[in-house]
Amino acid sequence: MTRQSFGMFARSRHAFAIVVALVCILLAGARLQSATAVPAANDAFNATWARSDKPVADGVANRTWLWGPGPINNIEVEPYAESPGGMREVRYYDKARMEVTHPDGDPSNPWYVTNGLLVWELIHGKVQLGDYTFEERAPAEINVAGDLDAPNAPTYATMQLLLYVPAFNAGETLIYRIDRDGEITQDPTLAAYGATTAFHVQQPGLDHQVASPFWEFMNSSGTIWDGEAFVDGPLHDNPFYATGFPLTEAYWTTVLLAGEPTDVLVQCFERRCLTWTPDNPDGWQVEAGNVGQHYALWRSSWEPPTPTPTATSDETATETATSPTGETPTSTETGVSSPTSTNTAGATATSPAGETATATDVSASPTATNTVNPTSTPRPTNTPRPTSTPSPTATATLTPSPTPTMYETLENAQATKVPWSGWYWPLPPSSTLPNLYDPGGAMEKYDAYVQKTRGYNPRATQWELDHHSQGASWSGHCHAWAAAAIMEPEPQRQTIEGITFTQDQVEGLLTEMYNAPAYKYWGTQCDDCNKNGEIFKDVTPAEFDAVMRQYIGQERRPVILDVDPSTPIWNYPAFKYTRGSVVNGDTETVTMVVTIAVPRINVGGTATDTLRYTYTLKAGTPGEWTGASVNDHPDYIWIVTGRVRNGGRVNDGMSYNIVQEIIRGGPMSATPQVAERSLAP
């Protein structure tokens, strides 16, 4: 096998020709059309390639390719809504794709030719067909690095599992390995290579460190072609021009290169995945993966799946929506309940849409759990960044809102309160992810503060270890963070009685105070459900639409979504939506784009993501999910009605009043506090 994800170093010309031939064949069947008049694009593409890669091709510079030895296809046209005639000119190279989206622009502008966000598309399983138009697919099961047929190398689908792993610390030595399943382990022997974090990138929906070998490469200089002669200059006018922003942290992994196991450091950015092989010669240690080849393979070979109907016509006619009326759940010993058991009360209640429905007394809460490495694919995706973005330093969040002309009605709504991005605080111990009970963490500092001000140890840390340190690898406090982020102002770093609580630690204390919130919810948690069998016992489109429009649209208050319809639970607060719809007879076709706050560590404010759901509504039925939403829709939706429900249980060693005292930096008055031995709120 060829060394497919690296440059020409240690790769035979014969093998390269085979790969190029394969990709050309794939491109020929990729629904591309040959462009008939492309001199402007041809000149622009050639000039862009020549700046960095002509010196390599001519033997003047000894370094990795940025694009590749040459194009792997002729100029083609691909669909793009904002280009003239809905088509734009593109050309594929080993490492990337060049595009001219606006041919009437200024060819001298460095952004006249853009560099496709192919890695973003491969990881998220979305083909970008316009600034706000995407075609849903599955993430690419193609190896990011190493031989294509290696069975254990991480794929682009693997990288999707790592999107929300929090940024490593500044200057941290990189000793973390990943495998094909996205599992993260530590290997202290990797410290000998000396790779560290070097540059922190924080953009809407993105928060990651750039590894030192890659940051050095992105800021490197050397021989370039200025259009007339070889001169010395920076390889990139902007360090993020070729790569885009980082989508993951950098991890070590073992891949096969020509069949030989090799350790490489890999990091995926929006436009390229970079690898670092310390044993390679100078100039070839950092290389760009063959993303252009991978993308062409993925785009040309995919066939859309046949959607599984969510219900038969008979089921649609008889199913009714439910709306909980009771709030007396049974708490579990671990404090992490599951809204799976229900007790039909037989009463009636009015749903958010004003419809009469069978009321259900839910005997467990939507206290759910969250994950950094979930066991299923459905998950919120990063905010799409169109390939026509004018500059990689732009900070605006680009939301794929529907174009008004596509719909008969367009409705926008936002809650008054924007939730803050806190951490989900996993339950099982982790070597890389912070827990509430960590040494020197939130609970230990809380115990120290109470000891100092009240004269006793409330043992909040021990309670957390006893009750909230076990569970599935994805379990945590996402439900509690989502509720706290809606109900409480964002706390700040605080030093009190000589004890410094970081912002994350204060948020963690506040999050634990909402571990058993009072709530109302619609839908039913999927527990080991069979997607290919009967209809998901999830929130129906009619319920989802009604709750979103009632609470965000009319009452201007956030709601919480479990965005994974399968067993793992991901609770995120939603606070904004754009709803486009078309009515045809008695059926309304709806596209709902929802903005959610996502969990982050070491980040203040609100990091956001967007989710896109499509469904049809028809009077007297629960509605039907359509398109990708058939298998990727909310499990349930809920609202917070109070901090602690009747019978709910949070950490027995903690007091809400004391947490508020820490947040404020002292008691509200000089009145001495009575020592609290029983601190349950």
Image (cartoon, rainbow, N blue to C red):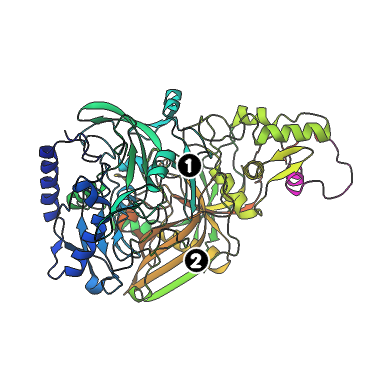
Name the element at disc 1: strand
- Specify whether 658 is left or right of 44: right
Q: Amino acid at mark 1?
A: Ala
Dot in front, 1 or 2: 1
Q: Which residue is mark 1?
A: 198
- In depth, the one of 579 and 268 nearer the eye is 268
Is 41 in the magenta?
no
Q: Locate the N terminus and report the quarter of the image it occupies.
A: top left
Residue 601 in view, yes or no: yes
- In depth, the one of 104 and 157 nearer the eye is 104
Which residue sits at x=30%, y=47%?
Answer: 139
Residue 460 sits in quarter: top right
- Specify whether 659 is left or right of 573: right
Q: Which residues are magenta?
A: 655-675
Q: Position of residue 354 (x, y in %)?
A: 52, 67
Name the element at disc 2: helix
- In depth, the one of 415 and 545 nearer the eye is 415
Q: Position of residue 404 (x, y in %)?
A: 38, 74
Q: Position of residue 505 (x, y in %)?
A: 64, 41
Q: Which residue is mark 2?
A: 549
